Structures are given as C-alpha cells and as structure tokens.
Amino acid sequence: MMKKTIPIMIAAMLLTVTAFAQEAKTIQLPKPNMSGGKPLMQALKERKSVREFSSKELTPQVLSDMLWAANGINRPELGYRTAPSAHNAQEIDIYAVLSDGLYLFDALAHELKLIASGDLRGLTGKQPFVKEAAVNLIYVATLSKLGNASSEDAAFYAATDAGFVSENVYLYCASAGLATVVRGWVDKTALGKVMKLRPDQKVILAQTVGYPK
C-alpha cells in the first residue's frame, strides 16, 4: 500500500509545483527602443481606428515598445510616466490579454506578470475581432490612489487619464505600422471578476492592438 501511495503523493506535489510555476509566470520585456519611428506630425496624420486585425503575434520588442509608450517610466529618477495623471496618482494600470493569458504590466520592472492562464481575449469585448488580434489592453483605475477625491472627481480623473494612455498607444501604433482601436463596449463586471479586481479597482476602457489584416 505504501509503495503505491508514495508515487501518487509525489505526482500530486509535482502537479502543485507546476501549477504554481505557471501562475507565477513573468515575461521580462526587452529594453524599450526609444529611438526611431515616424515623426510626430506624420504619426498624427496617420492615427486612426481599425477594426480588422491579423492573428500574427507581436514580437517581444514591439510589445515592449508599445507598453512603454503607453504608460512606461520615462524619467526613472522621479518615477514619472509617459502619460500624465491627476496629481501624479498613476492610478491607471495596464493589463495585456495575450493568446496565452492575462498579464499585468509592471512599469517599474518593465515586465508582464501572469494573472490568469489561457486565451481570454474573447472576454475583453463584444466585437468579433477581439478574439483574433494579438493583444487586448485593459485600462484599470485604482480609485483609492486618488486619495480624498469625490466619487465624481475620481471617475473623471480615471477616465481622462485612461484616455491619455490610449492616445499614446494610438500614436505608437501609427508610428510602428500597427492597427488599433479603443473600445468601451465591454462587460466590465464579468471582466473584472476574471481579472480578480478589488472593490476599489474599475475597468475604464479596452484597446485592441495588432497587425493590420
């Protein structure tokens, strides 16, 4: 009996360790390339919303550059970001939904931390293309970071600051030849449950990014 029990226990332990390793997965992004790209005026001229995407995945470098452009740290000595925020609250977090899982972008470490495994792109919106595009970004506001702001002001700041991040993505995509569209048609309650959001966290917007079809 003991001989049979030990292998079963070992197998169970291995499964537990494997599951933990998967849940603890972190993607260390390459250092963002802060040079090159199209001139600003040209990027503004070419900025647009696109709703047809290729299923081709973004390269690690493109993913890195796009997330840094969105809301990365551009003044390391101060911890300031590429996108402004009310009172420098930095209340907007970016979640990236890739084909293999849902990740949280850690701007300080410049890495993606796995929140949930599996292809969850279809949960990020109600349009058919969300299931096909390389990545869907979810902008989440942690309202408690806005301190004593009233609920009305907090909602205004969060929406405005998410808009700044979204526009940074638009300009990066125009510069890099990528397709993108920002979206509000999202089941925010259902998505928040999958994302394991706290009561003080709120989904503000989603944005799809990928190569044009």
Image (cartoon, rainbow, N blue to C red):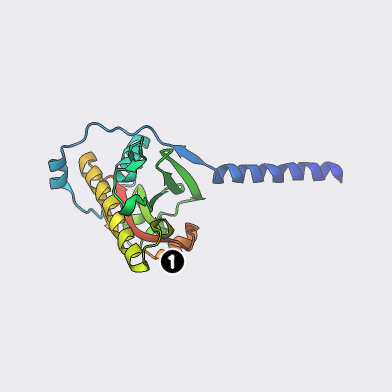
Residue placed farthest to the front in the image? Answer: 148
Q: Position of residue 92 (x, y in %)?
A: 37, 53
Total numbered labels = 1
Residue 198: give x, y in percent of width and height: 49, 60
Q: Is residue 61 visible?
A: yes
User: Where on the picture, by quarter, is residue 82?
Assistant: top left
Q: x%, y% of residue 31?
A: 36, 32
Q: Is residue 148 above or below residue 84?
A: below
| Kind of residue indicated by mark 1 | Thr
Q: Is residue 57 above or below residue 141?
A: above
Which residue is rendered at x = 60% and y = 46% of the image?
A: 19
**Which is more toward the observer, 205 or 122?**
205
Q: Could you tell me which secondary element the residue under label 1 belongs to? A: helix
> Circle 1 is placed at which residue position?
189
Residue 7 image position (x, y, % from top left): 77, 41
Tell me: 177 left or right of 150.
Answer: left
Specify few, some or many for label 1: CA neighbours under 10 Å numbering under 14, 14-19, or 20 or more: few
Please give the name of the residue rendered at 65% of the width and 45% of the height, measured from the top-left corner. Answer: 15
Q: For residue 159, what is the image quadrant? A: bottom left
At x 50%, y 58%, the residue is: 196
Q: Is residue 178 left or right of residue 80?
A: left
Q: Is residue 144 above or below residue 43?
A: below
- Please indicate, yes or no, whether residue 56 appears anywhere in the rendered image: no
Residue drawn at 16 percent across, 40 percent down = 40
